[in-house]
Every structure is written in structure tokens, then in C-alpha cells.
């Protein structure tokens, strides 16, 4: 089983939650509200710059932390399936993470929304390239266009998240 350092687990947590929140069969009013909020969020160059800096700041906390990857095993992937409000509350509960994000010019809510919008745009971009691919209901093409225009930056964000993972022995480093 692969384990991730607690700070570097943020992006996978958001991605896994996005699968639940953004799916058409998501549970209840919270999922519908979250889906609408992500659909309405617009990716921008300023947001990308702030998000990239916030992610660097959070990663820097991981380098300074005495928490090991092995300690992360006890926490599991408890972030999966959380609503946007729950993810924001989790980030806000840690003053260092909250400060790292805010120092980059974002609120924790915007940080979560940006990550979910990027994930959604990436998945939609891929789906549109498949035979018969269509834009999901309620989603505009603007974020997909932004994602495609900034493909190199998006790949770099993804590679940074992979590089932060822990290997099977609980050591930090690339997989």
C-alpha cells in the first residue's frame, strides 16, 4: 500500500473528493451545491500563479515538518468524499497550512475550488478528446480551454504532487 505524507495528501484528497462531488450521482444537496460551485468557478492566470505558490508553500511545510510518512498510515485517506465545506474546514483547522495558502493570495476555499476546477477541466478535456465526447451539463468550456492552454503548467503541478508521495517503505520521494 502506498502512503503519502500528510501535507502532500491534499491534492489526492481533493481529487478523490472531486470524483464524488462532481459525479452526476453524487449524494444529496451538498453534492449538487458543490458541483454548481465548481462549475461556476473560473480558472485564471492570477489564480494559477497563486495556487502554484500556495502549493509550494504547503510543500515547504512538509519539508520542515517532523511528521514522517509512516505516521500518515494511521490517518488513511479520510479526506475522500468530503464536501467543499469539509475540505476547507480541514485546511482551516491547521494554522500553518491556512497561512501558507493565504500568504500566496488565496483563501482556503479558493485553493480547494481551484484544485477541483483543474481536476474537472482535465477530466473533461480528456473526455472531449474521446469519440462521442460531450461537455457535461452545467459546465462551460472556459476552464477546459484554460486547462489546454496551460497544459505544461498543469503537468508540472501533477508531477509535483507525484514527487511528494512516499514510497512503500514510508520514505518521502518519487514513486
Image (tube, rainbow, N blue to C red):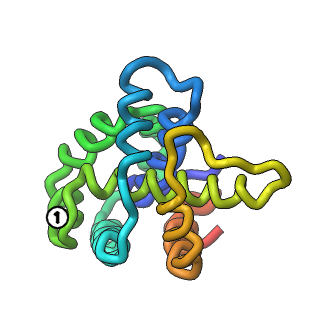
- Whether residue 75 sits left or right of residue 159 in the image: it is left
Residue 65 placement: quadrant = bottom left
Residue 73 showing in the rendered view? yes
Instruction: Determine crowd level at label 1: few under 14, some 14-19, many 20+ residues with C-alpha closer than 10 A.
Output: some
The image quadrant where one finds the C terminus is: bottom right
Q: Residue at x 19, y 57 (%)?
A: 107
Give x and y (percent) for residue 110: 27, 55
Residue at the outermost bottom position = 152
Comparing 156 with 139, the one in front is 139
Q: Which SS class for mark 1?
A: helix
Give x and y (percent) for residue 150: 52, 78
- Whether residue 123 sits left or right of residue 26 in the image: it is right
Say which residue label 1 marks.
Answer: 102
Give x and y (percent) for residue 55: 35, 69
- Whether residue 106 sits left or right of residue 39 in the image: it is left
Comparing 73 with 138, the one in front is 138
Residue 173 showing in the rendered view? no
Q: Relative to 122, does residue 139 appear above or below in the rendering?
A: above
Comparing 138 with 30, the one in front is 138
Residue at the outermost top position = 28
Q: Relative to 89, does residue 25 appear above or below in the rendering?
A: above
Q: Residue at x 75, y 50 (%)?
A: 133
Residue 174 placement: quadrant = bottom right
Give x and y (percent) for residue 138: 50, 40
Q: Residue at x 59, y 72 (%)?
A: 148
Amino acid at each position: 500500500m502506498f502512503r503519502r505524507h500528510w501535507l502532500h495528501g491534499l491534492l489526492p484528497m481533493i481529487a478523490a473528493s472531486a470524483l464524488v462531488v462532481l459525479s452526476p450521482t453524487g449524494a444529496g444537496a451538498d453534492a449538487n451545491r458543490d458541483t454548481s460551485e465548481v462549475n461556476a468557478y473560473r480558472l485564471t492566470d492570477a489564480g494559477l500563479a497563486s495556487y502554484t505558490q500556495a502549493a509550494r508553500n504547503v510543500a515547504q511545510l512538509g519539508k520542515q515538518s517532523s511528521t514522517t510518512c509512516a505516521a500518515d498510515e494511521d490517518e488513511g485517506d479520510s479526506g475522500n468524499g468530503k464536501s467543499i465545506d469539509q475540505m476547507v474546514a480541514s485546511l482551516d483547522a491547521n494554522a500553518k497550512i491556512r497561512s501558507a495558502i493565504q500568504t500566496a493570495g488565496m483563501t482556503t476555499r479558493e485553493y480547494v475550488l481551484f484544485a477541483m476546477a483543474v481536476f474537472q477541466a482535465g477530466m473533461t478535456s480528456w473526455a472531449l478528446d474521446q469519440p462521442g465526447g460531450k461537455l457535461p451539463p452545467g459546465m462551460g468550456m472556459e476552464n477546459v480551454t484554460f486547462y489546454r492552454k496551460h497544459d505544461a503548467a498543469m503537468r508540472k503541478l501533477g508531477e509535483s504532487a507525484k514527487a511528494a508521495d512516499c514510497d512503500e517503505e514510508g520514505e518521502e520521494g518519487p514513486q
